[in-house]
Every structure is written in structure tokens, then in C-alpha cells.
Amino acid sequence: MNLTKKAIILNILFLNLLVGSCKNEIKHVEKAEIKDADLPKNVLPKMKPLVNEKPKLTASYIAEKHKEIDSFYNKNWPNNSMNGSFLVAKNGQIIYEKYEGYANLRDKTPITADTPIHIASVSKVLTATAVLKLVNAKRIDLDKKVTDYLKEFPYPEVTVRMLLDHRSGMRNYAYFTDRDKTVWDRHNTLTNQDILTIMGTKNIGLEQKTGTRFAYCNTNYAMLALIIEKVTQKSYRDAMAEIIFKPLGMTHTFVLDFDKDKHNVAPSYKANRVEIGIDYLDKIYGDKNIYSTPRDLLKFDRARNSPSFLEPDLLAQVYTGYSNERKGTRNYGLGIRMINWENGKNFYYHNGWWHGFTSSYIPLKDENVTIIALSNKFNRSTYAVRKVSVLFGDYPFKVKDIE
């Protein structure tokens, strides 16, 4: 072999080594975590899935818990009375799930694992999550006044944090739009922007002084949805899809497109199976109007446990109780309800109720357990799923309640 051929071979080997090194460097850059605060201003922060959770559950553990949960299910919803969906998982692994009844009683469409059901006020947890990701990305400041984002907003002392933890003092939009036609004609469908305009022009007073006490109020989250739109320059529907639904593969989750799909989604029913019609409040989003499934909500819950979800200081604020004006165990954080017992044990959850839809979302953070129940036929038994928590941890609910 002459020197020229050797030189050519050496050059080829060097180029292959260089190309391989560049490819590895590119892969390393692609895999590198970019913090939300370092994202370009035209890129929204996104939730990241939590995958490959450990330890893997053993078959015997799953069988034992499945049997215990099934006993609870049969006593909580006797005679196939749920008409909804129910899921329990640990470490992201499903231990128990059940789908029962009809999404639509008229045409007997069955509820399956892929049937989206209105999650009512559990929507607030998702709205809060989008806001918190924008806070994490330095696009929203928790302690800035709402007027910094919504110029029409008439209550100058209310901050974004007060919307999240229900301390704004505002009145519920359902109460100031329901009777006085000079405020709103119920023949017209109300929108989030309508609520803001009414409050800014119709002299709608506060229910109580801003910041003085906790008062759960849907208006807070309707305003948060408008802030999301203002900051992202996208519709709430598109922003939620980009920040949460699409990155997590929540393929059966969406914000209702009222004008397009109001007659195509699962309706809700009274306890006696009478269908509940659409009313003038059904276009409002942020506080409600997300449809989802337990499997999708499990993806969402696990992503909230990902190290990339929020910076530690901000995450700690989410699970801090802010309704401390009088002694008690019940409290509210930033988009999550909680019970704080004197023994130091904390129970986090959010329930929902809209028309005949009922929902319950329970993340047992200490045990990495997720409990989700959704129903489109009114039944308070949906909220009883909290009793399943005693099967996994030291929660002071009565054991006899699940037997």
C-alpha cells in the first residue's frame, strides 16, 4: 500500500470519528434539560412525562390491592351504579380500573377507557398547572397585580396568587349574572371576556375585602384562563394543549369547543337518569370545561411529580396552605385542596361538580399513588374514593368505610 492510499484511509477514519463525535454531541445537546426560565420568549414551557418509575410492582402486590379496591368499589357503587370511570395506580402503574355505564344513555354508547368525561372543577388543577409553568418560565409573576395582565380588571389589590388560592374576594359569576337582565340576559351564552367586562362596567362589588379570607370562587379561575391567553397570545384551548396535553400524550383530553362540539360530547344526567341540558354558563373555561379520562389524568399526575415540573421553591408554594385565618385541618394551596392533620400527615385532592358531572383527583404524594374517579351521572359516591387512601398510607379515614 502506497503513502497516498494510507493517507486517504487515515483521512476517512478521522472524518468518521469526527462525524460520530458530532452526532454524540448533538444527541447530548438534545437530551440536555433546558430550564423553563431559559426558553426563548416565543417558546412555551411544556410538561414532561415521568417515565420508568421504580420500583416495579410485584404481581402479588397488585393482586392483593386489586382485591381490596374491588371490594371498596362494589360497596361504594352497588348494582353497577357508577356510570363513569375509576382508576388507582402506584408509581404510574395501574393497579385497578373500571369503566361502567353509558356516555350517552340515548344511544347506549358505553363508557370505555377512551371516553372523555367533563372533569368539572378538577379542571382548576390543570389551569393552575399551566399558570405555574408560565411562572416557572418567568412569563407570569405570582405576586403581580391582575391589572398588570388584564387592564379592564376592576379590583386593584388582587394578585395572581390570590386567584390561585381563592383569596381575591370576588363574587361567583354564576351569582351576579343569573337574575338581573341589566347585568346579563341569560338567553345569551356567557364568555370569560363577558365576565371581565361585566365586572369592569356594572359595578359588581366584592364579596369580601381582598386578601382577608379564603372563599372558593369559580370567577378566579375564569380570570386565570384569560391571563394565560394574554401571556401566551393563544386561546386557552391551544395553550393548554401546547403546555400540557400534547407533550404528555393526553390524546383524549381537550378543552370544550362549545360552538363546535357542545352536542358531540358526553352529556350529564341527574341521579334519576334525566339528561341535564346546556345552559348559558357552559362556555366558561378555566374553572371547568376540560374533558379527560383517568388514564390521561394519570399521565398528568405523574408529570407533576417529575423533577422538571417546577423549581423547588415554587413547588413548595403549591403545597402550602393559604387559608389559615381560622384553625382547622382543611386548606387550599395553589390550585389544590388539602387536609393538614396535626400529626403532620397531608392529604391533597380536588373534587369537581358541574351539572351531573362529578370528579375526584387524589395524588397521594408520600406513597406515589394516584386515585381518579369521573362520572356523568350525579352521584356523591365519586367523592368517597378518598377512603381508598387508607390502603396505602396512614390516613385517618375510617378503615370500616372501605370494607
Image (cartoon, rainbow, N blue to C red):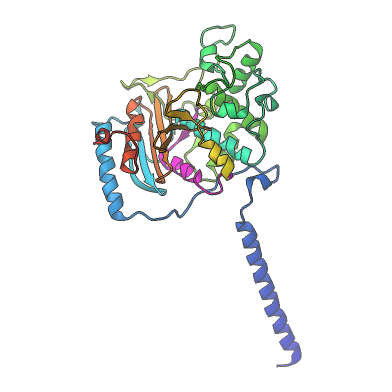
Q: Nearer the viewer, residue 249 or 159?
A: 159
Q: Is residue 31 left or right of residue 381?
A: right
Rendering coords of residue 33 (x, y %) = 61, 53
Outermost residue to the right: 4
Q: Is residue 29 left or right of residue 61?
A: right
Report if residue 292 lies within the magenta region: yes
Report if residue 345 lies within the magenta region: no
349 is higher (above) or lower (below) than 50? above
* Residue at x 44%, y 53% (from the top left corner): 53
Quarter of the figure with the C terminus: top left
Task: Kindly indicate the quadrant of the structure image that contains residue 70.
Answer: top left
Task: Kindly indicate the quadrant of the structure image that contains residue 311.
Answer: top right
Q: Nearer the viewer, residue 252 or 55?
A: 55
Q: Is residue 203 visible?
A: yes
* Residue at x 36%, y 36% (from the top left corner): 85
Rendering coords of residue 331 (x, y %) = 46, 29
* Residue at x 56%, y 20% (from the top left corner): 212
* Residue at x 63%, y 10% (from the top left corner): 203
How many badges with numbers are in the image?
0
Rendering coords of residue 337 (x, y %) = 46, 31
Q: Is residue 108 visible?
A: no
389 is higher (above) or lower (below) than 278? below
Rendering coords of residue 371 (x, y %) = 38, 39
Quarter of the figure with the N terminus: bottom right
Task: Kindly indicate the quadrant of the structure image that contains residue 181.
Answer: top right
Residue range (magenta): 288-311
